[in-house]
Amino acid sequence: MKHYTDLVAECLSTVDELFPWDLEEKLTNTPDLLLVDVREPYEFAAMHIDGAINVPRGVLESACEWDYEETVPELAAGREREIVVICRSGYRSVLAAHTMQRMGFKHVYSLKTGMRGWFEFEQPMLDGNNNPVDEDTGEDYFTTKLRPEQRKPA
């Protein structure tokens, strides 16, 4: 039986990752860079990187293709563009980047450490109304809040 982290580890053999400081540099030097945030809409509304588009992981494959209700034209037309996939911690983004590579996207990266790392690197984030997210809000958001029933049984 494979676990979530096993699946991520398998995909890492083909997915290139960028650290937050690498992304900061790419944002400066790559004007056509496409940021794809694969978190759920409520996560994206809480905080995201300026200019990112939200394509939830659950609709990624159809969003990458033409002729679907979920099609995101900028993404479907972006197989030759440099793309950085973003999630909360850098795991979902690895799985998404791997899928996109299999679908023919040539220059896909995953943001290692995800939005959590972006926050820890003290980079700006916006909320759903495009207002800056303050440090206290970010700290609260990234604090793990597992309920007892979500923990592995002893």
Image (cartoon, grey):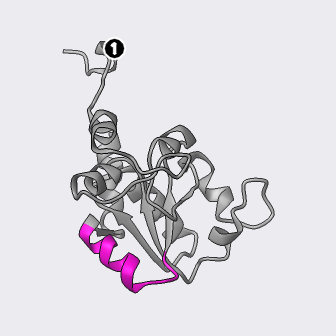
Residue range of the region highlighted in magenta in the rendering: 21-33
Res. 72 image quadrant: bottom right
Q: Is residue 88 left or right of residue 41?
A: left
The crowd level at tag 1 (other Cα within 10 Å; few <14, some 14-19, many 20+) is few
Q: Is residue 58 magenta?
A: no
In the rendered view, tell whether residue 117 sits above or below residue 147.
below
Does 11 sit above or below residue 39?
below
Looking at this view, is 58 or 147 the one in front? 147
Q: How many callouts does the rendering have?
A: 1
Amino acid type of the residue that numbered disc 1 sits on in the rendered structure: Glu
Q: Is residue 31 magenta?
A: yes
Question: Looking at the figure, which quarter contains the N terminus?
Answer: top left
Residue at image point 31% right, 78% down: 25
Q: Position of residue 146 (x, y in %)?
A: 30, 23
Tell me the residue at 35%/70% (across/down): 14
Main secondary structure found in the magenta portion: helix
Query: Where is mark 1, residue-wise?
Result: 149
